Each structure stands twice: as C-alpha cells, then as structure tokens.
Image: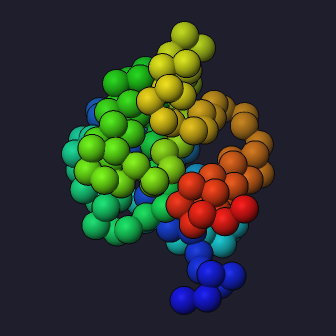
Amino acid sequence: MDKDKRKIRILVAKPGTDSHYKGAELLCQILRNAGMEVIYTGRYQTSEMIVNAAIAEDVDVVALSSLAWSQKAYYTEVARMLKERGAGDICVVGGGIIAESDKPALLAAGVTGLYGPGTPYQEMIDHIVQRVKKDRWHEN
C-alpha cells in the first residue's frame, strides 16, 4: 500500500477490572474521525490478551484506558510484553487519572504518551501520528 494512503492502526483496550467504558469509546470515535483504523477490544482485558491482539492485528499503536488506578501495573506490563515478543516498535499510550508519582516509571517503561481528563484531542492525535511515523514507519 502507498505509505501516503496507509492508515494508522490502533488498538484501544481497557485492562483490568475497570468498568468505565465511555472514555475509551469516545477515544475510538475521535481516532476514527482523525482517519485512523481503530480496533476496540472492550473491557476486562488482561495484558496478555491486549498484547496478543496487538500482534495479531499488526497495529501501530496500543492505547490503554483505565480509571482504576492500575495504570502503572498494566501499562508497564503491556509495554514490557510487547518488547519481549519482538513488537517493541508498537507505540504504547495511556489515558486515565494517572498519579504524578507513577508517570516517570510509565515513561521509562516505554509508554510514550500519558493523557488525563481534559487533554485536547489534537494533542493525543499529533503525538500518535508523530510516534508512529518515527518509531514504526521510520519516516522523518
């Protein structure tokens, strides 16, 4: 496929037992409206389920959403498992109410974007596009 016409493929997932789904579903619509191909796994996903789906679907990005204060455990585990499975070039971003004290560990684990409530949509979109072009598609 012509790289100028290729769409960013993004997997949106809700790890753990967080039942808040409206934010993730809104994110799916925002990303679709931005021209991305979105795969939504739904709620109650394990890290292994998310990583397996990301690899099987050959996505460019995994976007994790959680309001259950479990981001540090799940987000770092997903990033680690992707690397271990040879898919470390898949960009990992995460959203939710993320403790400031957790952010350094998340960034160090490879979660490149962290978004809380009120983050402008375009900020998330721009970050995803830039990271995919640089890290996944190896464009300037």
Q: Image point 36% across, 54% down: which residue? A: 87
Total count of labels: 0
Which percent across, then down, holds residue 61? 49, 56
The residue lying toward the viewer, choosing from 11 and 23, is 11
43 to 34, vertically: above or below: above
Which percent across, then down, holds residue 51? 29, 51
Can you say which quadrant of the picture contains the N terminus? bottom right
Residue that protrudes farthest toward the bottom in the picture: 1
Query: Residue 21's image quarter?
Result: top left
78 to 104, vertically: above or below: below
The residue lying toward the viewer, choosing from 99 and 79, is 79
Q: Image point 39% across, 39% down: which residue? A: 79
Q: Image point 57% across, 55% down: which residue? A: 135
The residue lying toward the viewer, choosing from 105 and 27, is 105
92 to 61, vertically: above or below: above
Query: Residue 78's image quarter?
Result: top left
Q: What colour-coding does the image apply?
A: rainbow
Which percent across, then down, holds residue 132? 59, 59
Q: Image point 33% across, 37% down: which residue? A: 80
Does the rendering let one see residue 122?
Answer: yes
**Residue 67 located left or right of residue 56:** right
The residue lying toward the viewer, choosing from 104 and 74, is 104
**Residue 51 located left or right of residue 39:** left
Which percent across, then down, holds residue 34? 69, 66
Does the rendering let one see residue 51?
Answer: no
118 to 72, vertically: above or below: below
Can you say which quadrant of the picture contains the C terminus? bottom right
